[in-house]
C-alpha cells in the first residue's frame, strides 16, 4: 500500500499512513484511555473485559451494548434481563460511556437541517448534521471523520485548515448518539453519511469500525446500505474497501473526469491518476455488483461542459454508474478565489448533456446554507478560523437529500 502524499503543509506533523486506525490518534491527548462502549461490538466487548480478567459471554455483551448503544441508556441499572453483577460492575468502572458535549446548535428553518457542534475529549470540536428525510420522522446524520482534513481540495476551507487528527471510532459513533438524543418520540436515525469534516478513507480503520457499530443490531441499528462513505479517491483504500466486501456505499468524488482539471481541484489527483482510480472503481463494481456512485461538485464555468461528459464516458465505459451532482458551497468572494455554483440554465444544460451516458443522475441538495447553518459555520465560530460567512468544512455541504432525479 503506498503512502499518502503530503497534501497540505499544515499537516506534515500528522501525515498518517494509509493504514491509519482508530489507535493512530495522538497519544498526547492525555485523556481517559479506557475503551469506550460506543466503539465496540459484542466480540470486542468480550475481549475488552477478558483483558481485565472479567468473563463475559457474547450474549451478555449484546445485552450490554443493546442497552448502552442501541437504547442509549446511561447505565446498566434496571435492565429487564440483567447481566451478571460482575459484568455490570466491570462495564461501569472499566469502560467509558460518556457522551460528547453539545456546545452549539443551529437549525436552518428553511430545510430543517440541524447542525450540532460537539466537543471531543481533547477540546477539539467537530460538527454533526441532522438531516430530515422525506419519510416523516426519519433522519440521516452527516458525520465528521477527522478534525480538519489533509486533502486540500481547492473549494473547501476545511482543506485549507489542514488536519489536526483522526477521530476514533467511538467519537464517530458518539456523533450519531448526540443527534439521536435530540429526537422526539417516534423519530429515528435511519441513515449516516460520512460527508462532514475529513476524508473518511484517510482514517480507514476507525471509519469502517464506526460504520460497523452503526450497522450492528446491538449498536446503531442502521441498515448498512443506508451508510455512505465519501472519498476524494484514495486509490489504495478504495481497492481495500472493494476487497473487504462491505455493504456500505462508497461515494467517490470525481469532480472532474478531465485529468488536468481534476488535478487543479484535488491535490490527491496528483498522486493517483484517473486511470488508476478508474481501475479501482472497476474492482469496486466487481466486488459489489452494484452501480458505482461518483459525485461531481458543480462549479460554474469549470466542470459543467460537454468535455466532462465525453471524458467520463471514455474513463468508465464499462462500469455502471450512479452520478451525484451537488452545487459547490464556497462562501468566499469571487475575487478571493471563491467558486460559484452554476446558474439554473448552466446546470440544466449539463444535466441534459449527461443523459447521453444512459446512467442515473441524481441531484443532491446541499442544505443548511442559511446564516449560522452553512456547513462548518459552527466549527468556524468556535475555532475563530473562518471569515464571517465562510464555510470551512465540506464545501458541498452534507449532500444527502435527493431533490431531482
Ligand atoms: S472536500 Fe472533503 S476531502 Fe476535500 S478538503 Fe474538504 S473535507 Fe477534505
Image (tube, helix red, strand yellow):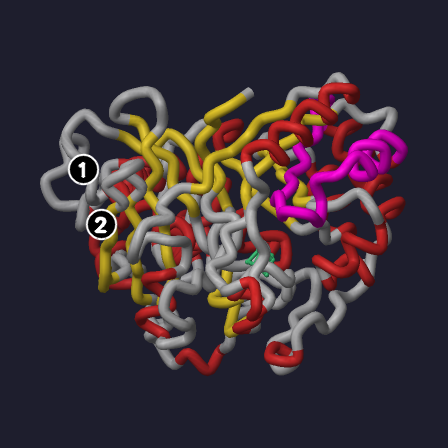
Task: Say whether residue 4 is left or right of residue 251.
Answer: right
- Asked whether the beta carbons under mark 2 and mark 1 sit within 8 Å of each other, the answer is yes
Residue found at x 74% / y 66%? 4
User: Which image quadrant: the N terminus?
Assistant: bottom right
Q: CA distance from mark 2 to mark 1?
A: 8 Å
Question: Mark 1 Cα within 10 Å, few/some/many (few <14, many 20+)?
Answer: some
| Image: 84 above or below 139 | below
Q: Would you say the beta carbon of the disc 2 residue lies within 8 angstroms of ligand 1?
A: no
Of callouts 2 and 1, the N-terminal one: 1
Q: Is residue 292 magenta?
A: yes
Q: Which residues are magenta?
A: 288-314
Q: Is the residue marked by circle 2 packed among few (<14), some (14-19), or many (20+) residues within 10 Å?
A: some
Q: Is residue 169 visible?
A: yes
Q: Residue at x 63, y 59 (%)?
A: 202
**Looking at the image, how many numbered discs can be counted on the residues?**
2
Quadrant, the C terminus: top right
In the rendered image, is residue 55 in sight? Answer: no
x and y percentages locating residue 171 in the rendered image: 39, 58
Residue located beneath label 2 in the image: 88
Residue 51 placement (x, y as % from top left) = 44, 60
Q: Give the number of the disc on residue 371.
A: none
> Is 72 or 44 nearer to us in this picture?
72
Q: Which residue is mark 1?
A: 82
Q: Secondary structure at mark 1?
A: loop
Disc 2 on helix, strand or loop?
helix
Amino acid at each position: 500500500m503506498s503512502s499518502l502524499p503530503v497534501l497540505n503543509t499544515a499537516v506534515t506533523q500528522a501525515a498518517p499512513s494509509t493504514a491509519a486506525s482508530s489507535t493512530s490518534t495522538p497519544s498526547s491527548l492525555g485523556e481517559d484511555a479506557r475503551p469506550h462502549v460506543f466503539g465496540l461490538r459484542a466480540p470486542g466487548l468480550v475481549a475488552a473485559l477478558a483483558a481485565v480478567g472479567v468473563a463475559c459471554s457474547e450474549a451478555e455483551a449484546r445485552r450490554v451494548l443493546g442497552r448502552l448503544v442501541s437504547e442509549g441508556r446511561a447505565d446498566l441499572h434496571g435492565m429487564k434481563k440483567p447481566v451478571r453483577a460482575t459484568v455490570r460492575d466491570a462495564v461501569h468502572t472499566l469502560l467509558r460511556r460518556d457522551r460528547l458535549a453539545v456546545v452549539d446548535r443551529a437549525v436552518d428553518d428553511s430545510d430543517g437541517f440541524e447542525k450540532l457542534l460537539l466537543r471531543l475529549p481533547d477540546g477539539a470540536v467537530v460538527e454533526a448534521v441532522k438531516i430530515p428525510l422525506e419519510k416523516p420522522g426519519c433522519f440521516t446524520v452527516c458525520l465528521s471523520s477527522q478534525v480538519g482534513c489533509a486533502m486540500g481540495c481547492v473549494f473547501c476551507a476545511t482543506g485549507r485548515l489542514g488536519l489536526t487528527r483522526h477521530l476514533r471510532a467511538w467519537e464517530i459513533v458518539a456523533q450519531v448518539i448526540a443527534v439521536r438524543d435530540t429526537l422526539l418520540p417516534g423519530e429515528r436515525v435511519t441513515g449516516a453519511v460520512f460527508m462532514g469534516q475529513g476524508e473518511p478513507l484517510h482514517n480507514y480503520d476507525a471509519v469502517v469500525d464506526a460504520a460497523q457499530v452503526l450497522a450492528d443490531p446491538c449498536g446503531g441499528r442502521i441498515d448498512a446500505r443506508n451508510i455512505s462513505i465519501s472519498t476524494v479517491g484514495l486509490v489504495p483504500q478504495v481497492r481495500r474497501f472493494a476487497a473487504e466486501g462491505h455493504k456500505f456505499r462508497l461515494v467517490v468524488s470525481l469532480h472532474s473526469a478531465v485529468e488536468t482539471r481534476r488535478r487543479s481541484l484535488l491535490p490527491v489527483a496528483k498522486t493517483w491518476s484517473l486511470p488508476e482510480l478508474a481501475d479501482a472503481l472497476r474492482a469496486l463494481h466487481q466486488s459489489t455488483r452494484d452501480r458505482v456512485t461518483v459525485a461531481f461538485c458543480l462549479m460554474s464555468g469549470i466542470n459543467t461542459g460537454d468535455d466532462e461528459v465525453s471524458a467520463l464516458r471514455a474513463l468508465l465505459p464499462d462500469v455502471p454508474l450512479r452520478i451525484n451532482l451537488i452545487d459547490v458551497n464556497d462562501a468566499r468572494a469571487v475575487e478571493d478565489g471563491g467558486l460559484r455554483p452554476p446558474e439554473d440554465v448552466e446546470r440544466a444544460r449539463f444535466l441534459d448533456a449527461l443523459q447521453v451516458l444512459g446512467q442515473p443522475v441524481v441531484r443532491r441538495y446541499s442544505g443548511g446554507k442559511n446564516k449560522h447553518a452553512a456547513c462548518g459555520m459552527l466549527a468556524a465560530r468556535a475555532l475563530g478560523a473562518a471569515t464571517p460567512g465562510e464555510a470551512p468544512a465540506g464545501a458541498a455541504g452534507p449532500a444527502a437529500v435527493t431533490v431531482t432525479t
